[in-house]
Image (tube, rainbow, N blue to C red):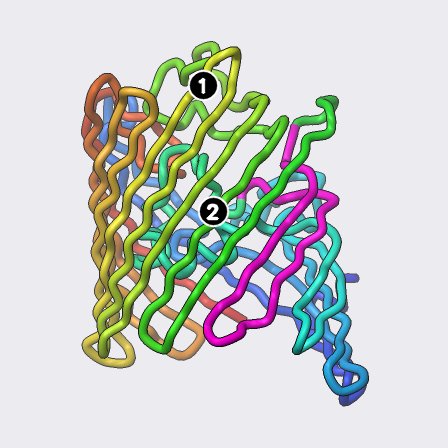
Amino acid sequence: MGGLCLAAVTATANAQVEAYGVVDAGVAFLSDVGSGNSTRAVNSVSLPTVVGVRGVERFGTAWSVRFNLENGFGASSGSQNNPGALFDRQAFIGLSNSQFGSLTVGRHSRLNFDLVMPRHSAGATIGSTFAFHPGNLDELANMSATLRSLKYRTPVLNGWEAAVVVGQPGRSAGTASGRNMQVAIAYSTPTSAATISYGSDHDRYLRTLSQIGLSPFPGTEGGMEAVLAQRVTNFAIGWRHAQGTTIVTALVTRTRIELGGRVVSTQNADVAARWSPNTQLRYAASLSVSRIGDAQWATVGATATQLLSTRSAVYLQWLSQRAFRGGRAAIPFAGSVASDQTQQMLVAGIRHTF
């Protein structure tokens, strides 16, 4: 397996296997961490740090067999994101047809990660993990893969495509087997795109709740890192438009959580824009407003990215979050809740794809 992951191999003209990956890391300054500030190494800032292997074998005129195995890890430590899970992000195999679409079985990323996040979210537009929403409850980041699942994606027809996933949500050991269903419909033209998605989980394992600026998170005891929700439903609608060297995106997500005998509703709204004055330089800015129960957060962000080559880039990011109505500032994935209502973050990083 080690040799397979380290080198790309072409077996025949119709069968191809390749290794791929991203290494992304930087240094961040974070204000108001407890009683002071913090400077720390950070990972997966502008893109997830991953290593994987994927392959395809074509046969006939339109059919192919495809597989993908992908693992996430931390560049600063070399440790896996989920110890004990070799391919924690994706692990699937299936059939694909140019007329009928693709059907795969295994461990799949969420449709919000596949079709909503890369096209519409502020985090993708400015290239910042830290611009995602509190707790990633709407699953724009690939933190809770769908296990033992089937995924079907249609081919793109006159700009339209659709996808459906059925399986089990990520959950803790020893809990009952959950059920998951996701559907998404997308439409795109050369300049614009729109996507609508819906997902429903029974017995979903919610992580990083203690990193949200609420103590306690509604329906939990204080300080809990993760809990099992009885049901979580997600709805998202996004829009994207490109005009020349400028891209504008907008996104709204809503999440309903049944947890500890309570119903918790969350909403997020994003607007973002990216401008490229030349082929090597990109500027981007975003605004996100989030609500969980009565608490609210507003986050603004800006990024400057310098492409060093087609595979390497350096970047500088700034984010600022303000909490309202009982919440505390906690920039997503930064790992530290502020003692007050305001938190700032400055990140300098580098990434390479292969």
Query: What element does badge 1 sit on?
Result: strand
**Residue located at (46% from left, 67% from top):** 352
In the displayed structure image, the side of residue 71 where residue 218 appears, left or right: left
Q: Residue 268 appears at what percent x and percent y?
A: 32, 39
Q: Which residues are magenta?
A: 143-171
Q: Which residue is mark 2?
A: 141
**Residue located at (32% from left, 58% from top):** 239
Crowd class of label 2 (few under 14; some 14 to 19; many from 20; radius 10 Å): many
Q: Quick one: 144 or 9, which is closer to the camera?
A: 144
Q: Residue 54 appears at what percent x and percent y?
A: 68, 68
The disc labelled 2 sits on which kind of residue? Ala
In the displayed structure image, the side of residue 78 where residue 86 appears, left or right: right
In the displayed structure image, the side of residue 239 where residue 35 appears, left or right: left
Crowd class of label 1 (few under 14; some 14 to 19; many from 20; radius 10 Å): some
Query: What element does badge 2 sit on?
Result: loop
In primary-sequence order, the first of circles 2 and 1 is: 2
In the displayed structure image, the side of residue 132 where residue 153 appears, left or right: right
Depicted 90 relative to depicted 294: above or below: below
- Per the rendering, the mark at residue 263 is 1
Q: Quick one: 189 or 342, which is closer to the camera?
A: 189
